Amino acid sequence: MTAFYRRKYGSSPLCHLCNSQEESIEHLFLLCPSMETIWFGGVLNCKVNRNEITTWTNWLLAIIKANKNSKADMERILPFVAFLCWHIWKARCCLLFQQQQINPSQVLAVISTNVSAFLEASRAPIISVVQSRPGNHVQARWTKLRHPFVKINVDASWVAATNDGFAGVVVRDFFGSFTATQRYRFNAHSVAATKVMSILRGCGLGLSLGLNYVVVEFDLLDSISCLRGKITNGK
């Protein structure tokens, strides 16, 4: 029986998508027919066999056991399973509380983006960053938006010795809830170029997610002149 129904917020313990079974953990993530497209459409091409599922834990242990001899497969599979379950839960909550229909293709695109960012960050070397002087510090504050706008926050760093530019992008909805994230690495010849590339990467991520109402937030004011055509400022 779902916690939602148990707390008397719902009129039925049945799954809100299929209305055929109680929304247990196993049903929510694995057994609901509406989830088949998401599981099968991802990089795992996983076809869930309902007759073999007893508990969520046993199902996950079976996957681990089947791939225990391949470290590479485990490093690929487990993050995907974790992000997939998180976004299934998030999509179902958005359907229940915001009446947003579940789009399997969009869910899979966000999952793929998150897994790629996680794996890249896991392999990335630790880079020391020079901190700003205390007198120049400005407190960062995240401000909410109104529906249906989504906010894309962008930050950047540059390593002069190697000409490596790095961009970090985080996407949140108008509630402030996490939607997607991505980390990018690219070649850049200056700080200004790195900042501009970071803004473009943030806009590109929003475009790939099919977002139509977006606010891009960053602390790269000097880069706007470069994007508007004043290339001399970008060196």
Image: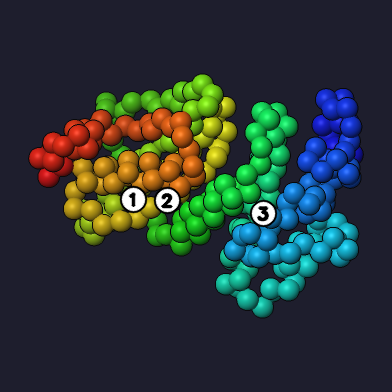
Indicate the quadrant containing the N terminus: top left, top right, bottom left or bottom right. Answer: top right
Residue 166: give its label: 1
Q: Amino acid at mark 2?
A: Arg
What residue is at 68 percent from the left and 50 percent from the top? 85
* Viewer-proximal residue among 129 and 45: 45
User: How far is disc 2 from disc 1 in space, using C-alphas?
Assistant: 7 Å
Residue corresponding to mark 2: 183
Where residue 215 appears, as percent x and y from the top left, is: 41, 30
Residue 38: give its label: 3
Q: Amino acid at mark 1?
A: Phe
Q: Earlier in the sequence, mark 1 or mark 3?
A: 3
Residue lying furthest bottom: 69
Q: Is residue 234 left or right of residue 43?
A: left
Q: Amino acid at mark 3?
A: Ile
Dot 2 lies on which element?
A: strand
Dot 3 lies on which element?
A: helix
Q: Is residue 150 left or right of residue 48?
A: left
